[in-house]
Image (tube, rainbow, N blue to C red):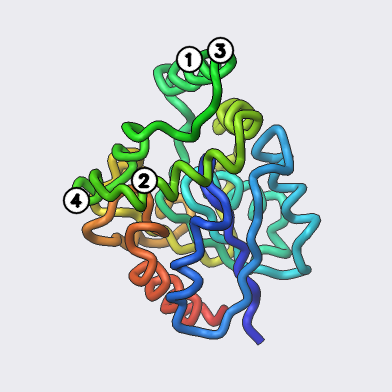
Amino acid sequence: MTLPVVLIPGFMLDDTLWADFVDAFPDDREFIYASLRGGDSISGLARTIAEQLPERFVVAGFSLGGYVARAIAEAFPARTAGMILIATSLREDTPAQRQAKQDAVGALKQGDFRGISRGAIQKSLHPARHDDTGLIRKIQEMGKRLGAEAFIRQSGFIRDRITLHPIVCPVAVIAAQQDQLRCYQEAVELAQLTGSRVEVIEESGHMIPLEKPQQLAARVAAWLKAVNL
């Protein structure tokens, strides 16, 4: 019997992120959708999510969700059979990134939240998708559904308190060829920590599950088969 795969989205994203990926998945597999709503810290989210999961599982995290996935694997190593890290990193926020988040939260408190800005979304996409109005709207709508409170809380997550202990379960590290938010070296660092190698999705920006769901599904399915999960 195959194990369920827990899908953890990224910053201001919801289950919709995974819809095309799940539809494209070539094998019969149970997917469990996790939410970033259940805590005020990455470690808190990890505990909340794990409480709702079966005894054994494979955890997959995209971007911010990758930090949560690592926290789950480190807190519950006996339960985590495998881990898939997609367009994510080991690195903490830089001072400039922290300041940008603080500025965004400060601006939000003075006005209405309308989702992630078009410019920020375009930066997360492959250049060929910068004018893809449908895709941009889909990402904005996810943010709107989550709302201002989620934006403030997720912006405050501290990413430098996850330990760097070696992960004992099998790990897949997947990166995008043209990710403007997470460089290839960040994926290499993850692969070195986890004893894995980097799988690169070509012609994709940061938003791999939305930009290249079929390719991502094929890579994940092949890896799960290779490690007998």
The label on residue 110 is 3
Residue at point 52% right, 46% down?
Answer: 142
Q: Are marks 1 and 4 in contact (CB under 8 Å)?
A: no
- Secondary structure at numbered mark 1: helix
- Mark 1 and mark 3: span between their CA atoms? 11 Å
Image height of 228 relative to 108, above or below: below
* Amino acid type, mark 3: Gln
Residue receiving disc 2: 136
Residue at point 40% right, 50% down?
Answer: 87
Residue receiving disc 4: 128
The quarter of the image holding the N terminus is: bottom right
Q: Residue furthest right?
A: 51
* Amino acid type, mark 4: Ala
Image height of 87 relative to 106, above or below: below
* Amino acid type, mark 1: Asp
Q: Earlier in the sequence, mark 2 or mark 1?
A: 1
- Mark 4 and mark 3: span between their CA atoms? 34 Å
Whole-percent x and y of residue 31? 61, 70
Q: Are marks 4 and 3 in contact (CB under 8 Å)?
A: no
